[in-house]
Image: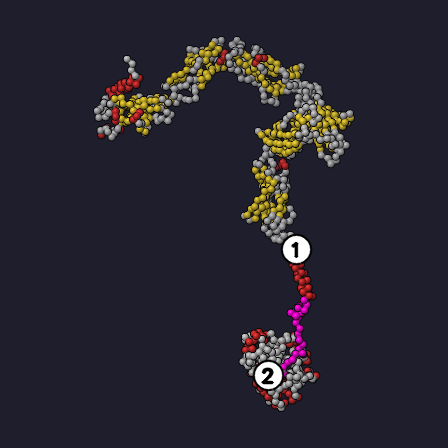
């Protein structure tokens, strides 16, 4: 009868549960899990069973599973019976290591609340079964003169890892050895089994499985690794200039192992090894001749060996180096010839320096050079031979001769190098003359740095032809580089089909080189092209020093600086940045490389500026030495311009005024020099109504007795306020009265003149009208003193007022001149009146009193009193009665 596997599995778990219950029947309500300490395989399902000791109160339905702290769903449970239940889970690398089984406390009796009896857990050890070991190999090394009996084997255990402990067992024939290493092991035999086949296997085993590698079955000598050959020697033979003989000693006796050998060699200036074919060294040997070598060259050789079998086997290590130099031979290549043309001011004369290098295949030490110089093909100019070399380094160039060409003719130079064996082929170079046709040049050259080398790329002119026999065909290129800092130069040749190359010379970092490319048309040199280049760039060592060019202005200043020395630039200058500042305000201006002066504009006048210049390369920037300057308050010529402008304006004004004075002289005379009437022609009203208006001619003796004249000019409003009380406000009335008195000679006059009032007078503005009127008056005081009553025999002074608009004379304005100029003023009196002889005494008394008062006037009250008494006395003395044509002056004479 066949049972299903699931039922078998369930039956097995039932038996285990029954055993667990019978075993723990003495423990009430105990929970247990089977298996106890399982090793589970990652990537496969694992099933565990939880069982209870027999009871009717707690059943399998009260149990549940936890993976760490997570409750597993009941879909993964399988009930075995009333006391056992199992769970199936997928094992992954992230699966928790602890699995728990627990009672459901909510349904169990209170007696089952003890956590020690209602939960159980197991620890899961995860891992993989071992993988099959791969690439098994074994090795037996040489010890002294024999092969060691210990065999060391190596294998690859796999990349997955097992996560659990795995043991490896190495089987060699019937012998086995266990090792704790997972990729190597050793096994020691009684002796090494020469001339036998060996079967080697490695086995890996852990708790999840066991596996073996593929067997390794080989001839025993295939596992042998001998020591390298000894006593290696390289011998140079003078009769064989291109070969070297090498000898060695085998490392082990041929009785035990038959060996084959391998030889490699290289020149001392190269690190590329060349190997001799195995077919040439397959036979058993201990010497070999290296052929087709370069003469006069140091060579390094090495030898190794392995068992002479068709199996893979193991080569021994390479022997120590053996070095020797091949013998000298005649130079196999021509010297490398070049020239330097020194510029000259003369077109027909040039200086040329001839340089050359040793031939690439000199095959010996070059001892001398044979140089021939020809101006024409049939004319030999000179032959020079250098019998010694100043240096022994073949890579150094040799300065042969400095030539001077004349008449602009081309020069042909031929050089032969000699060593101890013979001479080299002839090197020929044609230096074109000034009148020779120019050959197609190089049009473009580019340089860049890459992988620590300076690369050069060029392009020929479209008229040039590469290779062939055309007269313009390019056979080679010469790449020349010259250090700007120290003038050291070198060159190298490239074939005519090349378009780029890396410079093979030793270039210095941060040093500027002038790189030139010249095409060679057979022996003729075409026109080259030169560009600057750097192997590597860096920040300049110093910045430019700025200084002021000329004097600064008020708003601009011109700066200048010198180029940084080429040996201190250490890179291409990208640009210059000018910083100028005053106070905390700073401005920056960037100018391109190659600019060495700049004019700052829009500066503030009378301001101090600090300035510096920064030089920049692609690697960084550096500031130069700063400077400072101050702008002017005024721009140059500004003050002169102002002065010239003012002078021109003044001159123009003077010219304009002069022209106005010339063409408008009448207008100017009227406004600036008005016509002043002669006082002698003015009509002064009579002093009294009793005198006639007709003016009598004064007598000579009267003029000489005049003592003074006083002028009264009304210039105020208060004076007119007194007159307004006594004068009628009519246009045809007189506004003022001029009273004058002539003292001396017994004559006097009194006159008045009425003027019509302006419209402004009707408005009551008498002060302004009067201010424009010049009034003349003279007062003759009565004989007596101020404050005293005049006697009946004294005369009353006559007062008069003139309405003339004529300005005052200088003598009338100046009171101090009255005494000195009195006769002149009186002589111009417009209306002198004669007074009787009986009044002379009275007038004399008034003059004395006048002088005693310093020509001042009496108070108004006293004048009025004397006026009345004097008037009555005059009338009584003359004995006549007249009717006055003037209004009486009520207020009296105004105080001056």
Question: Residue 367, can we see it?
Answer: no
- Find residue 820 and report its horizontal and vertical position in percent: 67, 78
Q: Residue beneath label 2, please?
A: 886
Q: What mark, if any, has residue 640 been given in the picture?
A: 1
Provide the secondary structure element on which disc 2 rests.
Answer: loop
Colouring:
secondary structure
Q: Nearer the viewer, residue 183 or 757?
A: 757
Give the residue displayed 78% in from the left and 25% down from the top.
Answer: 378
Residue 515: image x %, image y %? 64, 32
The tag earlier along the polypeptide, 1 or 2, is 1
Q: Quadrant of residue 185?
A: top left
Q: Is residue 473 above or below residue 654?
A: above
Q: Residue furthest left?
A: 56
Magenta segment range? 664-689
Give left or right: position of 358 versus 194.
Answer: right
- Location of residue 794 (image quadrant): bottom right
Q: Quadrant of the N terminus?
A: top left
Where residue 882 appears, as percent x and y from the top left, is 61, 88
Q: Nearer the viewer, mark 1 or mark 2?
A: 2
Q: Residue at x 67, y 19 (%)?
A: 328
Q: Is residue 106 visible?
A: yes
Nearest the eye: 225 or 766? 766
The residue tagged with tag 1: helix, strand or loop? Answer: helix
Measuring from the top left, give residue 667's x and y in whole percent: 66, 68
């Amino acid at each position: 009868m066949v049972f299903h596997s699931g039922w078998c599995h369930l039956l097995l778990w039932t038996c285990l549960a029954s055993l667990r219950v019978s075993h723990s029947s003495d423990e009430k309500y105990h929970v247990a899990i089977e298996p106890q300490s399982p090793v589970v395989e990652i990537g496969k399902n694992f099933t565990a069973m939880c069982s209870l000791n027999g009871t009717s109160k707690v059943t399998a339905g009260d149990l549940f599973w936890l993976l760490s702290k997570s409750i597993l769903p009941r879909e993964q449970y399988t009930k075995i019976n009333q006391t056992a239940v199992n769970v199936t889970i997928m094992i992954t690398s992230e699966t928790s290591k602890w699995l728990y089984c627990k009672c459901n406390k909510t349904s169990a009796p209170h007696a089952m609340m003890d956590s020690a009896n209602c939960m159980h857990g197991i620890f899961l050890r995860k891992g993989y079964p071992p993988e099959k070991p791969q690439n098994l190999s074994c090795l037996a090394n040489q010890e002294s003169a024999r092969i060691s009996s210990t065999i060391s084997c190596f294998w690859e255990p796999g990349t997955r890892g097992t996560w659990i402990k795995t043991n490896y067992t190495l089987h060699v024939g019937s012998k086995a050895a266990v090792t704790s290493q997972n990729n190597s092991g050793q096994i020691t035999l009684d002796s090494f089994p020469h001339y036998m086949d060996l079967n080697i296997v490695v086995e890996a085993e852990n708790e999840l499985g066991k596996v073996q590698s593929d067997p390794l079955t080989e001839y025993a000598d295939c596992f042998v690794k001998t020591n390298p050959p000894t006593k290696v020697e390289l011998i140079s033979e003078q009769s064989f200039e291109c070969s070297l003989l090498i000898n060695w000693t085998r490392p082990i006796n041929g009785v035990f192992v038959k060996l084959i050998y391998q030889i490699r060699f290289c020149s001392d200036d190269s690190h590329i090894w060349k190997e001799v074919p195995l077919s040439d060294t397959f036979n058993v040997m201990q010497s070999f001749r290296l052929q087709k070598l370069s003469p006069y060259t140091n060579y390094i050789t090495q030898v190794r060996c392995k068992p002479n079998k068709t199996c893979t086997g193991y080569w021994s290590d390479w022997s120590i180096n053996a070095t020797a130099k091949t013998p000298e031979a005649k130079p196999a290549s021509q010297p490398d010839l070049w020239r330097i043309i020194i510029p000259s001011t003369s077109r027909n004369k040039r200086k040329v320096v001839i340089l050359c290098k040793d031939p690439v295949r000199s095959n010996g030490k070059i001892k001398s050079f044979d140089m021939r110089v020809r101006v024409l093909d049939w004319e030999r100019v000179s032959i020079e031979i250098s019998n010694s070399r100043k240096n022994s380094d073949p890579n150094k160039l040799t300065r042969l001769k400095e030539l001077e060409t004349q008449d602009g003719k081309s020069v042909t130079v031929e050089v032969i190098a000699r060593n101890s064996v013979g001479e080299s082929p002839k090197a020929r170079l044609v230096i074109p003359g000034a009148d020779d046709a120019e050959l197609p040049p190089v049009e473009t050259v580019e340089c860049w740095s890459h992988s620590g080398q300076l690369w050069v790329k060029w392009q020929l002119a479209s008229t040039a032809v590469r290779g062939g026999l055309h007269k313009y065909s390019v056979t080679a290129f010469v790449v020349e580089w010259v250090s700007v800092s120290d003038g050291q130069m070198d060159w190298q040749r490239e074939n005519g089909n090349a378009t780029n190359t890396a410079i093979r010379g030793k270039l210095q970092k941060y040093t500027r080189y002038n790189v030139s490319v010249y095409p060679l048309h057979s022996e003729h040199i075409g026109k080259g092209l030169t560009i600057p280049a750097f192997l590597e760039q860096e920040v300049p060592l110093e910045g430019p020093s700025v200084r002021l060019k000329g004097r600064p202005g008020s708003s601009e200043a011109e700066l200048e600086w010198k180029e940084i020395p080429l040996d201190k630039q250490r890179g291409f200058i990208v640009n210059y940045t000018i910083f100028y500042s005053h106070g905390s305000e700073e401005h920056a201006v960037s100018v391109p490389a190659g600019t060495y002066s700049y004019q700052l504009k829009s500066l503030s006048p009378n301001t101090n500026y600090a300035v510096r210049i920064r030089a920049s390369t692609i690697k960084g920037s550096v500031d130069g030495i700063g400077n400072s300057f101050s702008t002017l308050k005024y721009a140059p010529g500004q003050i002169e311009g102002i002065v010239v402008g003012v002078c021109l304006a003044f001159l123009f004004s003077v010219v304009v005024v002069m022209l106005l004075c010339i063409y408008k002289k009448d207008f100017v005379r009227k406004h600036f020099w008005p016509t002043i009437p002669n006082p002698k022609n003015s009509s002064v009203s009579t002093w009294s109504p009793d005198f006639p208006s007709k003016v009598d001619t004064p007598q000579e003796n009267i003029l000489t007795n005049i003592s003074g004249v006083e002028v009264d000019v009304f210039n105020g409003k208060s004076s007119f306020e007194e007159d307004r009380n006594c004068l009628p406000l009519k246009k045809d009335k007189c506004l003022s009265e001029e009273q004058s008195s002539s003292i001396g000679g017994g004559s006097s006059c009194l006159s008045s003149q009425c003027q019509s009032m302006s419209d402004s007078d009707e408005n009551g503005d008498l002060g302004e009208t009067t201010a424009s009127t010049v009034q003349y008056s003279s007062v003759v005081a009565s004989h007596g003193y101020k404050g005293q009553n005049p006697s009946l025999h004294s005369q009353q002074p006559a007062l008069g007022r003139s309405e003339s608009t004529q300005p005052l004379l200088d003598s009338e304005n100046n009171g101090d001149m009255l005494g000195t100029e009195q006769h002149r003023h009186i002589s111009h009196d417009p209306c002198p009146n004669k007074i009787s002889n009986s009044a002379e005494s009275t007038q004399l008394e008034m003059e004395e009193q006048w002088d005693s008062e310093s020509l001042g006037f009496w108070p108004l009250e006293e004048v009025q009193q004397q006026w009345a008494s004097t008037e009555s006395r005059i009338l009584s003395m003359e004995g006549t009665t007249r009717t006055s044509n003037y209004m009486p002056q009520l207020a009296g004479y105004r105080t001056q």
